[in-house]
Structures are given as structure tokens and as C-alpha cells.
Image (cartoon, grey):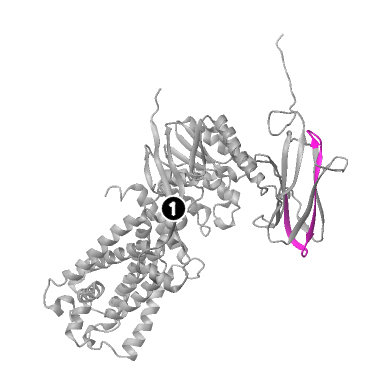
Amino acid sequence: MTQQVVISVDNVSKIFRLPHERHGSIKSLFVNMFRRKRTYEKQKALKNISFDVKQGEFFGIVGRNGSGKSTLMKLLAGIYVPSKGVIRINGKLTPFIELGVGFNPELTGRENVFLNGALLGFNRKEMEAMYDDIVSFAEIEKFMDQKLKNYSSGMQVRLAFSIAIRAKSDIFLIDEVLAVGDLAFQEKCYKVFEEIKASGKTIVFISHDGSAIERFCDRVAIIDKSELIAIGKPRDMVLKYGAIVAEDQQEAGNKEVKNKVTHHGNGSVSISKVTLRNFKGETKSSIVEGEPFTIFAEYSLKSSLKDKVIVGLDIIDEHGISILGPNTNELKKIITLLSDGNIEARFNSNPLASGKYSVTFGVFNHNASFAYDLTENAMRFKVLGERRHGKIYIEPEWTITQNT
Amino acid sequence: MKHIFSKQNKALLSELVRTDFKLRYQGSVLGYAWSLLRPLLMFVILYVVFVKFLKIGTDIPNYPIYLLLGIVLWSFFTEMTSQSLGAIVGRGDLIRKIRIPRWLIIVSTSISALISLTLNLVVVLALAIISGMDFLVTSVGLPLVLLEIYLLALGVSLILSALYVKYRDVSYVWEVCLQAGFYLTPILYPLSKVTDVNIQKLLLLNPMAQSIQDARNMFVTRQTITNATVFNSQFTRLIPIAIVLVILVAGVLYFKKESKNFAENL
């Protein structure tokens, strides 16, 4: 069966011309103006990209931040024009690449639904017909007459997603929409993806998260440093992508940049010492698979913080992928830091597979919009063991029933 | 043409205008009433200063209406061009993230300005009736003059909004131009105060001056000095009209060329 090609990207490059803002003197500014010569720095965001996407495919694009994948998405959506090459689109494409574009915080939820619908090409009558479905899918019936600025970010995303999936497109462009929203809603989103896919529509999905890519995509392209590295089966591509990321990190590691403890944040809190302790409370550099452990951090304050703080940590594997990322925002309790002290995070069960890990430790303000201290590579440790499969290990309850 | 007036574009246009209107008077107690109050208050000030204090225009019948009509038309031009100027940059969030026809943004701004114009004209009409002015038959020609002003403002808006994406100096330059234009156009003063006929001729080559004077001639009084009377020819009126068309075509072409790169230049 030969499927119709719906997106054809043919030798596309995109070059941004970034003007040099700074002029040495007023004189040079005028001289440059009259010569009509502005100095530019050329930045190649994409180099000679070619690929095809066929009707009904779930096509994934992975790449790191700054690799050029968002630029590619904007080119596909028709927001940017390629500097070189041609993009042919066969069918109706969603015109947006991000959720909630055009949301106005000063308007009510209801008004925003109509505005957003209009951006997708629906008039008021059509939107009125869909309105109840949209609101009930987003699960925010009660809030529709409140201004959007009073919504939580999760509510905004839910509303945006509910509108976006109404788009009558043949080709959907989705750029990491699932980064926000709670788990239950994420599952709902995944279901919608599956429905869209089942209805024979084409989806281009951009992410830097391997697991989502592996779960949905039929074919995956890797973009790195503005170039198309490979296209192939999701499993192979995710492994390859992991290898590229790991290789780079190793390189960086060799230069001893990555392994350095780096502090970000405004310095109101400073995390001085982060250690790993085993279940007996002894400081260790490695633990065995399944062994409970505690991450112990000492901190000092510039002055007491009366506002709520969020403490969080990330356990990152050697590929740079966050395996566990708990934070205190998920607790119901409000935490304040009034004097110097220490923070303990005890893991009574240890699901980590064997390998090398690093810990990032942070203390943030009440809504995590900025960090008091965010310490990357605060500590490194190893988990020893034999498990080969999976990044985490949870023992299921096995039941085997045999017909006799 | 079918594409331009497609269902999608119409839906988007109506939502953009609606949003604009909703947000404009948000947080004010009187709300939409300001749309009518503003021109009325403005008129009271001008009437007191120019008609009562300075006693200008005593030789022109219905001078208050004459004055107000000129001001209303000029404010339409000012409002539309200065709001369009920042419209593309102001809607940067949309342009960077969604594919919509860029010109829709300018057209939606122009519709908002047209709505204010309509409200202002209602005020003019009401005052004309109250003051017992005799309506001229030629008033039916007014829409043509309004169209000319609209097309001029549209052409200028397209050029300014596209230029502003690249050069933020444009807003200051345009502010000065509008100030200069306000005094070079016989809005506050009757053209008869300019005694040199050659200067009168020169001033009436400006499309804004020509159209405002024509509008007054059609609606308020036959005694208005217009392009036709000063040149004593019906054809010289084609010069300002040609200027409007040139600006409009240049605006459309320049905007079309630049709009491709709005997303990355913003």
C-alpha cells in the first residue's frame, strides 16, 4: 500500500539574520545608516533538512533545546518562511504550534474560548455548538465566567487543549503539550492522540522526552545541531538519541564542566553540603539496588524566609534524564525556612536501577517561579546491582494461572 | 477575493474586533459611554475656545458643526494610523506562534477605528439636528469622502505597522508627522484665513485637507473652499486621489513583502 505524502520537506535551510544591536558610537550608527549597511550575524538554525511524512503517520521529532526542532515546527506551520528549499503541505494543517496562543488574561474563560476558536477558523455559531463539550472536557465548568488571569496554569492548559483538539485539520502539529497538567489529564490527552491517530489523521509530534515518543510514534527523526541525524523506528531512534546526548555529556564531562557543582538562584538560601546516607544513617557514595536511602542537605539562610518555599530534588541518570523528581509542593503542608538547618529526603523504597546518578537540589519560592538556590550536580552516587532492564524497578505481584 | 472573505477570516476578524472593544474600556465605570463622551467633551472645549473666545469662523454658517466634522475626520485618521502602527508588534504573541493572515490584524484595528468614527459621526449628526442646520442634498456623497480617508489611512497603516517591526523610531517620527499634519490641514482654522491663494492650492493637494474640505462642502456649507473651487477645476481633485491610491498600493505591496518575516523580526 502506498500512502500519500502529506508533508514533504525538501532540502530546507533556515538562516536567521541577527542584527548587531550595539553601535560603537553615534557616528558609526549614522555612517552605517547612510551606507545602508547593517551588520548581521548569520545563524543557521536548520541545514538542508529533507524528509517526508505520509498520510496517517504519527511522526516524531526529537532533539535537544536549541537543536532547531521548534524552528522546523514553525516552518511546517507556515509561521516562518524557509531561507532555502521547499516545504509542500498536502491537506489542512493546524495553524498553531503551542497551546493557548492568543489567550487573553483580561478576558473570561468563556470569551477566550470564542477567541481561540476563531483562531482555529470557527465562527461563533460553530463554537456555541461545541462549547459545552469543550468546557466539560477541560473540567472547569465552574470557572468559565472568571477572568483567565485567575486560572491556574493547569486549568489554562486544559482549556487550551480542549479547544485545540476541535480543530478540523488533517495534519496536527504538537509541541510538547504534555509538559503541564496532572497525570489524569495527561492520560486523557494520550487517549485523544490515539483517537486522532485512529481516525487516519497525520500528527507531527515534537519532544525531547524519549518515552512519549516511543509510545506513540510510527517513525522518528532526530535533529541535532541544526541537522537531521537520522530517521527510523522509534525504539532505535530513542536509543540513538540517548547515545548522542550521553556522548556530548561525556565530552563535557571530560572537560570537567558537567561534573562541577553549579549554583543558580538569588542566594537567599545556600545549600552547602548534599550527601547520600544508607538506611543506617551512614554517609555513602553508593548503595545497592532496592536499598532504602536518604538524601541529606545542609542549608544556610541570609535571613529567614516567612513565605512558603518549595524544596525539590532531581535524581538524574547518566544520560541526563531525570528519573525521580519529587518536590514538597505535592505535600499539603506549607514549608517555611526560618533558620539554618538541614533537609532530609528519605526514600523508603528505592526503585533505581543500577547505574550512575547525580542529584540536583533546589529551594524555590512559593510557586517555583524562581530559585533561592538551585544546585546542579550537588552530589553523585552509584547504585550497584545486576538489573539490566528498565530505568526503575517496581516489583509487580505476579500471578500465573495455568489451564490444567 | 473569495479567500480574503472566507468564513475563517470573517470569524477571526469579528473576534479580534470584539476583543479589542471589550478590552478598551475595561476597568472604567462608564465603559462604552466613553466612546460618545470623549468626542462630546472634546467638542465642548473646542467650541468654547474657538467659537466663543477667539470668535473664529463667524463668516461661515454653522461653524461649530463645520469645526467638529473636521476634527472628527482628522481624529479618525490619527486613531487608525497610530493604533495600527503598534498593532503588529502588539500582537507579536499571535504572529510568532500561529499562522493567521497578518493583514487581518490591521483590518481589525481599522474596524475598531471605524466604529469610533461612526459613533463620532452620530454625535455630529445629533448636534447638527439640535442646532437646526439645514441639511444639504449633497450629503449623500459623504460616504465617498469617508472611503477616500479610510483608504489613505489603510495605506499609511500598512506601511507604518510593517516599518515599526524593524524600526521603532517610526512611532516618534509619526507622532511629529501627525502634529505637523494637524496644523497643515485646515481643521481648526477656516482656509480663508490663509490669504495667499498659492498656499491654499498647495494645502489642498494634501488628501486629508481635500477630503475634509469636500466633506464640509457636502454636509455643512457650500461656502467651503475646496480643491475644486481654489483651482477652479474638477480635475485637480484627482491629484490627491492619485496620492491616496499610490500610498495604498505601496502599502499593500510593502506589507505583503515584509509580512513573511514578521515572525522572526519581532
As rendered, which of A45 and B178 lies closer to the eye? A45
> Residue drawn 57% across and 32% down?
A215
| Chain of the residue under label 1 | A
Q: Residue A190 appears in which quarter of the rendering?
A: top right
As rendered, which of A26 and A324 lies closer to the eye? A26
For the C terminus of chain A, the image quarter is top right
Q: Position of residue B232 (x, y in %)?
A: 11, 78
Q: Amino acid at mark 1?
A: Phe
Label 1 neighbour load within 10 Å: few <14, some 14-19, many 20+: some
What's the magenta bit mostly, secondary-structure-wise?
Answer: strand
Q: Would residue A4 be found to the left or right of residue B61 on screen?
A: right
Q: Position of residue A119 (x, y in %)?
A: 43, 50
Tell me the magenta residue range: A287-312
Instruction: Please tell me whether residue A97 belongs to the stretch shown in magenta.
Output: no
| A311 to B178, vertically: above or below | above
As rendered, which of B83 and A132 lies closer to the eye? B83
Residue B106 is at least partly visible in this image: yes
> Residue drawn 39% across and 36% down?
A8
Q: Position of residue A159 (x, y in %)?
A: 54, 47
Looking at the rendered structure, the secondary structure element under dot 1 is strand
Residue with the mark numbered 1: A16
